[in-house]
């Protein structure tokens, strides 16, 4: 699930990008070796560090790689534009068995995942989802999500979860969308994870009766909206992540409900 504008950027003349002469030809693969992982980490650096101002203890600024200690344990989906010969989208996924090998799920530093662990259901954590800026708003994300759906089916996943982010840590600026998520999309108690006390931020900031829901939804990032459309719900409280310059929420999705809603979305779009 996605992460946190670049800080200290020098003022330069706008860069003129060449117009792509051919439509992208997409292919999705799983990272197989160190070079594949480096390609994912390079794109993540471009998005999360250069573009959005994130950081981290293991970020390699000299090599331009955004990485952390969990990378070796995750499976990494790579979206390639074959016509350009580059990786333009990534997603990383951590199954329960991989989390045991890593010692924890990545998001357990931010959220108490006890309700999910007690559920006895097969879990998959999502993270570090991003697209190259030239590929946003088109079909690229559809290819990644289709590959993710196949992975979920192959591994008999019951619940997807992971942190998703609002840019910035000014809670008052985010009061409306956070309150909307709390009032309208709070997870049921049996799967309601909770942000840990160290950086817990209540999302119940504006009373529902006075909340402009339409304006609030306009502030919700596109990826979070997509998860909500597929039946996603959020845990209790946000987490203020000053390292990544983000305010995080934890999204939880039941894959059975997700598959039903996804089918309806695709059916309505195809006109069938």
Image (tube, rainbow, N blue to C red):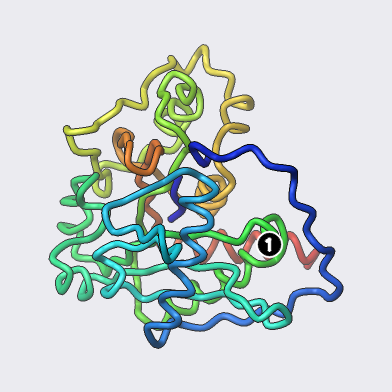
- Residue in view at x 45 percent, y 22 percent: 175
Q: Quadrant of the C terminus?
A: bottom right
- Residue in view at x 52 percent, y 64 percent: 43
Q: Quadrant of the N terminus?
A: bottom left
* Res 152 seen here: no
Would residue 192 appear left or right of 226 to someone viewing this image? left
Q: Name the residue that disc number 1 marks.
A: 135
Would residue 44 appear left or right of 262 to someone viewing this image? left
- Residue in view at x 45 percent, y 81 percent: 36
Q: Residues within 10 Å of mark 1 (few under 14, many from 20)?
A: some
Most foreground residue, 251 or 101: 101
Image coordinates of residue 61 in percent, x first then y, are 40, 57
In this view, the residue farthest toward the top is 210
Image coordinates of residue 91 in percent, x first then y, are 46, 67
Query: What secondary structure is marked by label 1?
Result: helix
Image coordinates of residue 217 in percent, x first then y, are 58, 32
Position of 133 relative to 181 (above/below): below
Most foreground residue, 179 or 248: 248
Most foreground residue, 126 or 49: 49
- Residue in view at x 74 percent, y 43 percent: 13
Q: Quarter of the image holding residue 206?
A: top left
Would residue 114 appear left or right of 272 to someone viewing this image? left
Position of 105 relative to 94 (above/below): above
Position of 207 relative to 196 (above/below): above
């Amino acid at each position: 699930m996605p992460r946190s504008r670049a800080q200290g950027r020098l003022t330069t003349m706008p860069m003129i990008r060449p117009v792509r002469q051919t439509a992208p030809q997409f292919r999705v693969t799983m990272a197989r070796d160190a070079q594949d992982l480096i390609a994912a980490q390079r794109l993540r650096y471009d998005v999360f560090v250069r573009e959005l101002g994130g950081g981290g203890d293991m970020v390699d600024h000299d090599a331009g790689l955004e990485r952390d200690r969990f990378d070796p344990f995750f499976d990494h989906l790579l979206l390639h534009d074959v016509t350009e010969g580059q990786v333009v989208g990534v997603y990383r996924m951590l199954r329960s068995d991989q989390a045991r090998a890593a010692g924890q799920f990545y998001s357990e530093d931010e959220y108490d995942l006890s309700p999910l662990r007690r559920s006895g259901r097969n879990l998959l954590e999502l993270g570090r989802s991003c697209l190259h800026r030239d590929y946003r708003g088109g079909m690229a994300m559809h290819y990644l999500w289709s590959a993710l759906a196949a992975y979920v089916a192959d591994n008999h996943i019951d619940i997807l979860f992971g942190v998703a982010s609002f840019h910035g840590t000014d809670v008052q600026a985010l009061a409306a969308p956070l309150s909307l998520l709390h009032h309208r999309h709070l997870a049921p108690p049996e799967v309601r994870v909770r942000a840990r006390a160290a950086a817990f931020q209540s999302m119940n900031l504006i009373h529902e009766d006075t909340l402009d829901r339409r304006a609030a939804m306009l502030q919700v990032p596109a990826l979070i909206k997509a998860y909500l459309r597929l039946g996603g719900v959020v845990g209790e409280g946000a987490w203020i992540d000053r390292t990544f310059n983000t305010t995080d929420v934890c999204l939880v999705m039941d894959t059975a409900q997700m598959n039903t809603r996804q089918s309806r979305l695709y059916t309505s779009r195809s006109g069938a």
